[in-house]
């Protein structure tokens, strides 16, 4: 029973990337002490890292999950976050939109809602937004990364340095208090830094699975975010720290959002 439970926890964290103690207690119908012992054992074995209220996958800092895997993970959370983010956009805004699956859901939610100008290094996002005649899309140049279909490098950085943004929609690979916002790709991280410098307001989008994760490259400290939009399962300890930094934190509820949409 003990071994099978721990094997199941390993399977779950490899699939979800983050688990909460409270959820594991319900799933396995055991005490908080039992789950804590399980997580402590699995941390020593190198499978995970314990964080406040749960654990995150002990993933290599330079290894990004495949786009196809990220695309289907936490889809309900991502769409709820994206729809909430669109509410912060005003007609006439000049937006920078990051790459990634949550940013792509933001682009879909933006269609037909606002008259804006968008700069992006994501080919899928540029394709989505080009369908809307009220959205002007400026595609940054650079070297194409296969699989992600994004562009980056000195060409993209030079082009971006000539523009000013009202708001930057920032995707997040990892988020911790100590290491701030981190991500995996060096050239894309450099471009993000340029977009951060050129933006008046930074809006970070991430579901709960990125909390406690540390990727290889530092993007910016948490204090650089003006707004963070996440879901109801996000790490409360990290969110508490962000409140002290005067960052506006918005949490969505995927179930409630789906019910509103269906109605």
Image (cartoon, rainbow, N blue to C red):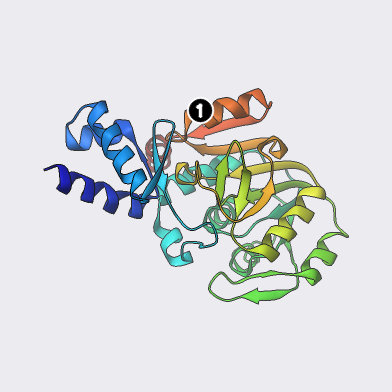
Residue 214 in the image: state x and y as whole percent. Answer: 54, 49
Is residue 83 depicted above or below 157 in this figure?
above
Is residue 28 depicted above or below 100 in this figure?
above
Residue 123 in the image: state x and y as whole percent. Answer: 63, 69
The residue closer to the viewer here, 34 or 70, is 34
Residue under the image location 64 percent in, 65 percent down: 122
Position of 194 with respect to 78 (left or right) is right
Position of 149 with respect to 96 (left or right) is left
The residue positioned farthest toward the left in the image shown:
1
Res. 139 image quadrant = bottom right
Res. 156 image quadrant = bottom right
The residue closer to the viewer here, 28 or 125, is 28
Q: Residues within 10 Å of mark 1 (few under 14, many from 20)?
A: few
Please tell me whether mark 1 sits on a helix, a strand or a loop: helix
Q: Is residue 92 visible?
A: no
Which residue in the structure is indicated by mark 1?
237
Is residue 122 depicted above or below 194 in this figure?
below
Q: Quadrant of the C terminus?
A: top left
The residue positioned farthest toward the right in the image shown:
162
How many marks can you see? 1
Residue 87 in the image: state x and y as whole percent. Answer: 61, 39
Residue under the image location 50 percent in, 28 percent down: 237
Is residue 128 depicted above or below 199 in this figure?
below
Q: Is residue 3 visible?
A: yes
Residue under the image location 67 percent in, 55 percent down: 97
The residue closer to the viewer here, 70 or 126, is 70
Res. 176 image quadrant = top right
Residue under the image location 69 percent in, 40 percent down: 221
Q: Quadrant of the N terminus?
A: top left
């Amino acid at each position: 029973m003990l071994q099978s439970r721990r094997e199941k926890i390993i399977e779950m964290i490899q699939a979800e990337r983050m688990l909460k103690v409270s959820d594991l207690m319900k799933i396995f119908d055991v005490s908080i002490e039992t789950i804590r012992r399980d997580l402590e054992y699995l941390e020593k074995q190198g499978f995970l890292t314990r964080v406040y209220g749960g654990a995150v996958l002990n993933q290599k800092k330079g290894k990004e999950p495949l786009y196809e895997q990220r695309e289907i993970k936490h889809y309900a959370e991502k769409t709820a976050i994206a729809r909430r983010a669109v509410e912060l956009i005003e007609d006439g805004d000049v937006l920078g939109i990051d790459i990634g699956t949550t940013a792509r859901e933001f682009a879909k939610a933006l269609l037909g809602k606002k008259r804006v100008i968008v700069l992006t290094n994501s080919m899928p996002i540029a394709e989505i937004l080009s369908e809307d005649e009220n959205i002007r899309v400026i595609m940054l140049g650079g070297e194409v990364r296969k699989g992600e279909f994004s562009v980056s490098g000195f060409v993209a950085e030079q082009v971006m340095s000539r523009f000013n943004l009202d708001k930057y929609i920032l995707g997040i690979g990892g988020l911790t208090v100590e290491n701030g916002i981190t991500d995996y790709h060096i050239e894309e991280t450099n471009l993000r830094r340029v977009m951060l410098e050129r933006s008046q307001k930074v809006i970070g989008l991430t579901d709960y699975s990125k909390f406690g994760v540390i990727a290889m490259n530092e993007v910016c400290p948490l204090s650089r975010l003006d707004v963070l939009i996440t879901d109801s399962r996000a790490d409360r300890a990290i969110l508490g720290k962000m409140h002290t930094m005067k960052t506006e934190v918005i949490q969505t509820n995927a179930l409630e959002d789906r019910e509103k949409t269906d109605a």
